[in-house]
Image: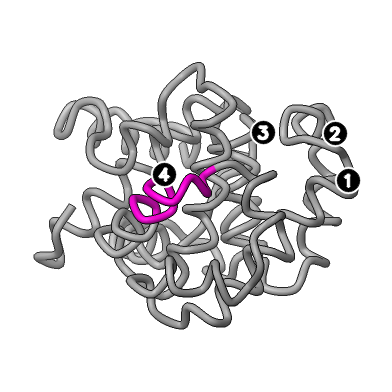
Amino acid sequence: MEKLDLLDLFRELQQKYGRPEGQWRLWCKRPKTLLEREEVVIGAVLTQRTNWRNVEKAISQLKEKGVCHLAEIQKTRPEELAPLLKPVGFYQTKTIYLLNLVNFILQEYGSLLKTKRVPLDSLRHKLLRVKGIGPETADDILLYALDKPVFVIDEYTRRLIKKRGLNTPLDYFHLQQFCQTHLPRDYRLYQDFHALIVIDGKIDRGEKV
């Protein structure tokens, strides 16, 4: 019954909102180009503790300066990169976090496409050891940039699960396991479902989508 509830909830949101728009038009795009995958990686770090409008401004500035590929970011000095990230707030810290992540990907695997070939559990474990990359950011990258079947948990997910009365612990690990156990293991479903949950949550709270 719980499995049916989650699938019914997905279909309900899908019928209500259609295909995810805004930020999610790129993040849920299938397939993505390498540049699009790298933009998702960058966005996953920059979106920490800010809204997507600010992330768009920062990414636009990166593109204007020709610093929108991971290899270009790696070659950019922190003092040159930081001003481009000002719109997202905490930009000095996020500059370091972004460089930490980019260095990990390129030094460990050589490219994002090679990173995509790494098994999910091994890659997730290593991502979580990168300073500045917590579970939600790691799973954003795994799901939306690398097409790995891992369900992203955020506050919108917790609020909706609680609102619908599903009886499960709301901490990250248990809620993620609950969703992955009671849904088909399909990254496309996970992408669209999580995106629709965020859209629904933002509309419910009167936030801009």
Q: CA distance from mark 4 to mark 3?
A: 14 Å
Crowding around mark 4 (Cα neighbors within 10 Å: few <14, some 14 to 19, many 20+) is many
| Residue 16 against residue 124 in the figure, above or below | above
Query: Looking at the picture, which amino acid does disc 1 mark?
Result: Ser
**Residue 78 location (% of width, % of height):** 63, 73
Mark 1 highlights which residue?
A: 122
- Given contact means CB atoms under 8 Å apart, are the residues at marks 2 and 1 in contact? yes
Q: Secondary structure at mark 3?
A: loop
| Residue 50 against residue 125 in the figure, above or below | below
| Residue 89 against residue 10 in the figure, above or below | below
As drawn, the label of residue 118 is: 2
Mark 3 highlights which residue?
A: 148
Q: Residue at x 32, y 48 (%)?
A: 197
- Given contact means CB atoms under 8 Å apart, are the residues at marks 3 and 1 in contact? no
Q: CA distance from mark 3 to mark 2?
A: 10 Å
Please give the range of residues in magenta.
59-68
Crowding around mark 2 (Cα neighbors within 10 Å: few <14, some 14 to 19, many 20+) is some
Q: Residue at x 24, y 36 (%)?
A: 13
Query: Looking at the picture, which amino acid does disc 2 mark?
Result: Val
Q: CA distance from mark 2 to mark 4?
A: 23 Å
Q: Nearer the viewer, mark 3 or mark 2?
A: 2
Q: Nearer the viewer, mark 2 or mark 1?
A: 2
Q: Residue at x 14, y 33 (%)?
A: 16
Mark 4 highlights which residue?
A: 194
Q: Residue at x 74, y 65 (%)?
A: 100
